[in-house]
Amino acid sequence: MSRPEIVISVAPELRVFVPSERRAGPTTVVTDGSSSLGHVVESLGVPLTETGRLLVDGREVPVSHVPGAGETVEVGAVVRPQTVPGAPLRFLLDVHLGTLARRLRLLGVDAAYESEDIGDPALAALSAAEQRVLLSRDRGLLRRRELWAGAYVYSDRPDDQLRDVLDRFAPELAPWTRCTACNGRLEQADKRTVGDRLEHGTRRTYDVFAQCVACERLYWRGAHHARLEAIVEGALSEFGGAAGLSAGSRPGFTRPGGHPCDPAHD
């Protein structure tokens, strides 16, 4: 029995996932006659997390559609900004995206991050349990069925990664309100209350502090503030968002003892 042939093309944004011979335009794919279109698309290398509308002979079909002989398939990219229904927009990042996680937290975005490799099954299960969008550059991880929602991070450069996520999901920004170390919320701290935890130079130089309600780390407007401010101002100017703490009370991100906690570095 001959196997059905279909003609398939993918959106330009998705051509990074397919073999080079399929990037120029429509190509022929031989199917087994029983697999879903979603399976066929993934077999070409495109994670379904990156797939938008699927058109068969010009009509939209679900991923469960079983393609028949002679059909022409167009695989569209996700429409931006992408909405994620069913839960508040929250993220989970894999072990390779620590810098991106800290930059998202700097902007007040809820970004959970596993600093140790807990394995693909555990990450996908955590995404489902907490209803978080899993961000990863691992295509295999994004194809796991237990995943609640996911997105491929297209660049390996932190600046581009941040712009990609903000452009794709348009999260609400509230800079300087979240701990870059643990993702907890920051609250303003009274200098008299936390003074015994500060080195003499810090206590003498700074007056405005914030403290994480989860891990109790202290933050103040330290030596790295200018670099962090540039990241924040760049994101706000391009993508908008709440101002977070007032300009006069924004702490720099320096941990107790003067050790940098800079989201610009791993």
Image (spheres, rainbow, N blue to C red):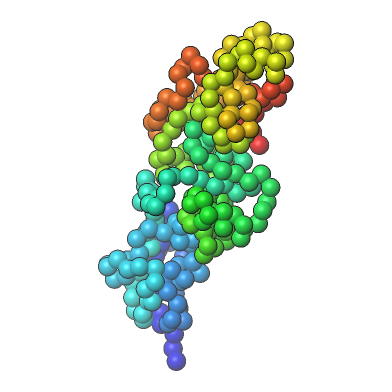
45 shown above or below 213? below
Tell me: 122 left or right of 44: right
Residue 204, percent from left and from top? 66, 7
Q: Residue visible at 57% across and 54% down?
A: 126
Q: Residue furthest front?
A: 193
Position of the C terminus, as image quadrant, is top right
149 shown above or below 88? below
Residue 70, percent from left and from top? 34, 79
Q: Residue visible at 48% across and 44% down?
A: 90
Q: Residue furthest bottom?
A: 1
Residue 145 visible in this rendered orientation of the protein: yes
Q: Residue visible at 57% across and 30% down?
A: 213
Q: Residue furthest left?
A: 59
Q: Residue visible at 35% across and 68% down?
A: 62
Q: Quadrant of residue 59?
A: bottom left
175 shown above or below 119? above
Tell me: 178 left or right of 118: left
Q: Quadrant of residue 1?
A: bottom left
Q: Residue furthest top?
A: 204
Tell me: 30 left or right of 72: right
Residue 15 visible in this rendered orientation of the protein: no
